[in-house]
Amino acid sequence: MGTSVQVTPLCGVYNENPLSYLVSIDGFNFLVDCGWNDLFDPALLEPLSRVASKIDAVLLSYPDTLHLGALPYAMSHLGLSAPIYSTEPVFRLGLLTMYDQYLSRKAVSDFDLFTLDDVDSAFLSITRLTYSQNHHLSGKGEGIVIAPHVAGHLLGGTVWKITKDGEDVVYAVDFNHRKERHLNGIVAESFVRPAVLITEAYNALSNQPHRAQRDREFLEKIVRTLEGGGNVLLPVDTAGRALELILILEEFWAQRNLGYDIFFLTYVASSTIDYVKSFLEWMGDSIAKSFETSPRMLQANPPPKAVKVTMSKRVPLVGDELVAYEEEQKRLKKEEELKASLLKQEESRASHGLDNASSDPMVIDTTNSSAPPDVAGSHRSGYRDMLFDGFVPPSTSVAPMFPFYENNTEWDDFGEVVNPDDYVVKDEDMNQTALHVGGDIDGKLDEAAASFILDTKPSKVVSNELTVQVKCSLIYIDFEGRSDGRSIKSIIARVAPLKLVLVHGSAEATEHLKQHCLKHVCAHVYAPQIEETVDVTSDLCAYKVQLAEQLMSNVLFKKLGEYEVAWIDAVAGKTENHDMLSLLPTVSTPPPPHKSVLVGDLKMADLKQFLASKGVQVEFAGGGALRCGEYVTLRKVGVAGQKGGGSGIQQIVIEGPLCEDYYKIREYLYSQFYLL
């Protein structure tokens, strides 16, 4: 039978709460995303707490709080101890996000759900993968392969593909099909016909305006406000969509030669920019040049005229409060010293033994209450008892004596021989130090974070309620970088999964997308509730077979990328010494000849670039056709063989007269495929 797959939402279904899902594949438990929200309510993590100890691996999709915010808390309080996988940007920027979350809350409250040490410990457990890298699990996960793919939305954003026995389980949420200034969009062709697709309904009811129109309205509002003497506040995340906004503003400021200051205010702002400059290969194709050189409707609801807000801030202790705090610290210190002293005495008694204490002239008999208090300081004749803390004479010695260690240091003509390894700082130690203080890749300390972390003065949080007169306008513009409803439906149809699981979206959006997909995509669409397990095991029957030696000796393999492929004519049967099915050569009748097969997937845009490099004049014509020279046209056509618009057999058709250009272009085309 097919690979066993179960999906259980732990958070983030029928609402817009953080994302966290349990995906079990043949008994191996993946936690896909481990999100929290800005409220940091532990009650939201109760479903996770019930399964945390059973998790075998964690997959992280994006470097924001909604996708990884609960990771430090889950590892320090809920018993989560599984290996974690992400891309390099998700690791680095996610770390900065959690540092910023902690420092922001610690500045205005007595936040104690997790510490910076918890953050460091969680993120140092992450294994980083590159896009399209196949990572083979071992042990309990033997036979399972995981691979991250481009998702857009945020830097390092990931669509996860999990493969077992030839069947794919794809987890794709918050993806973006649009190419942006700093990111490429999702490549849906990488996930055609998976056994299970887990995706979201977040934007199923929304349609976005054209990007140029959105950007123009956004920038016009900003300039109009600034020219009128006002200020503009853009609430953004720590290290996600803020990057796209920074690039938009930088580009527009340069075009208009504007002199208004732009401030990026987080506790880790400078570290974020430094990290981003090192991730150019993870971004869009044209972003490197930018660094080298330097519809939802508009929502303009009038804000209330006055609002009540609670302002909290951390202030140093002064006066009587400071005196009381210092006295309390002194009292606690004395208690600790007393406990340590009593503990040492107990350890000393245990190591020497109560019976030997009285006969050992080197040990003071503390039980002798008749000894005068000035024994140590008197000058009377006779022996004096002395206590050497930590010195225990060996049992084989005749009399107590201090141990002697011979110095075996090597010397040469220049002095003592030095071992260079003793003075080398290991990379992991440098990483640990940088992580602990909120530094960047080179260990450079983020000034705002450092000033907060290193400030050890006693302080308290003061809160007061204020009535604020609001004198501003409120405008909402969609820069979230997610695909809208129309695009989501189109992408799901192109992927054409055998079974579909919908998560993360309002109840209305989830039901709408479910009904659409049942009608246009596939017959198996699920939208489970929190802690409801749905079994999405494939209906296909899959068997493991081995190739018989007689068959292998006559097979001619050809290299296809990382793989070797061959055409095989065989029959299935059992051999004497093996219980597993084997593919055996046909002996009764010779196999019929087969037609030549061209293996590979060629994009018309890639072919255009290749032909241009060969000196062929080439341009796109109507309908996606490629006009080559004066007479030849290439078209990519497909036979719709799957419900929902997925294509079956695809062909590239060459149109034109049989001339020299025709044969030359056909030869170029064949060179881009593998012939079997």
Image (cartoon, rainbow, N blue to C red):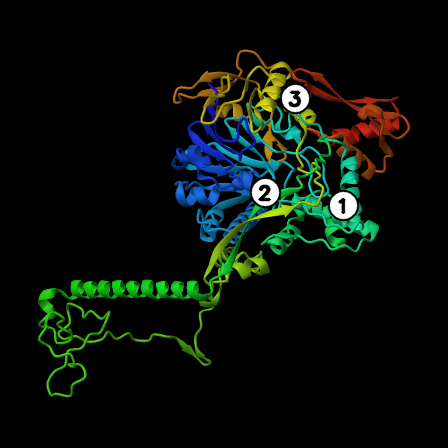
Q: CA distance from mark 2 to mark 1?
A: 38 Å
| Element type where label 2 sits in the image | loop
Residue 130's tag is 2
The reply to whether callout 2 and callout 3 are in contact (CB within 8 Å) is no
Q: CA distance from mark 3 to mark 1?
A: 39 Å
The residue type indicated by label 2 comes to Thr
Q: Position of residue 336 (x, y in %)?
A: 30, 63
| Front of the two marks 3 and 1 | 1
The answer to which of marks 3 and 1 sits earlier in the sequence is 1
Q: Residues within 10 Å of mark 2 (few under 14, many from 20)?
A: some
**Front in this rendered view, residue 660 or 19:** 19
| Element type where label 1 sits in the image | helix
To which residue does mark 1 refer?
Answer: 222
In the rendered image, the vertical position of residue 364 relative to residue 675, given as above or below: below
Q: CA distance from mark 2 to mark 3?
A: 27 Å
Residue 493's tag is 3
Is residue 637 left or right of 77 when viewed as pictured? right
Is residue 382 left or right of 177 when viewed as pictured? left
The residue positioned farthest toward the top in the image shown: 588
In the rendered image, the vertical position of residue 65 relative to residue 440, given as above or below: above
**Front in this rendered view, residue 667 or 556:** 667
The answer to which of marks 2 and 1 sits earlier in the sequence is 2
Q: Residues within 10 Å of mark 3 (few under 14, many from 20)?
A: many
